[in-house]
Amino acid sequence: MNIAYFKDMDSLYIELSTESADHAWEAQPGIVINLAGDGRVVGIEIEQASQAANLDILKIGGFPGQIEIIDQNQSGSTH
């Protein structure tokens, strides 16, 4: 799982699976759900994320896997 914020586009992407999306569904304006061919959610995109969510802090509780900080000072990801 990857969570990436793209400052230049003010877009937040939550990648649940590394597989490519087969199609996308806009659940609400600015909220795009990327789906695999069998209907599984592989990613969620939030456009204008700074207006839709509080980006000041990310809290993760009880996550069973390893947490890796990619870059504390700049936006970007390897998603």
Image (tube, rainbow, N blue to C red):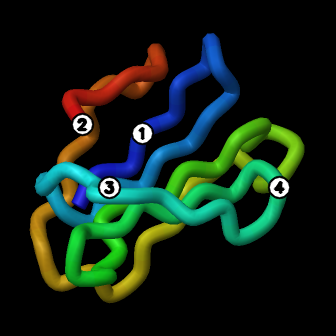
Image location of residue 10, percent across then percent down: 69, 27
> Of the residues tagged 3 and 4, which is closer to the observer?
4
Q: Indicate the quadrant where residue 9 lies.
A: top right
Tag 2 and tag 3, C-beta contact below 8 Å: yes
Q: What separation in Å lies between label 2 and label 1 (alpha carbons)?
A: 7 Å
Q: What separation in Å lies between label 1 and label 3 (alpha carbons)?
A: 8 Å
Between 32 and 6, which is closer to the camera in this rendering?
Answer: 32
Please name the amino acid that badge 2 sits on: His
Tag 2 and tag 1, C-beta contact below 8 Å: yes
Quadrant occupied by the C terminus:
top left
Q: Which label's residue is closer to the chain start, 2 or 3?
A: 3
Q: What separation in Å lies between label 2 and label 4 (alpha carbons)?
A: 23 Å
Q: Residues within 10 Å of mark 4 (few under 14, many from 20)?
A: few
Tag 1 and tag 3, C-beta contact below 8 Å: yes
Image location of residue 30, percent across then percent down: 76, 49
Tag 2 residue? 79
> Of the residues tagged 2 and 4, which is closer to the observer?
4
Q: What separation in Å lies between label 3 and label 4 (alpha carbons)?
A: 19 Å
Between 59 and 1, which is closer to the camera in this rendering?
Answer: 1
Tag 4 residue? 29
Please name the amino acid that badge 4 sits on: Pro
Tag 3 residue? 15
Residue located 38% across and 22% down the image: 76
Specify the label residue 76 is tagged with: none
Report the side of 46 relative to 13 (left or right).
right
Tag 1 residue? 4
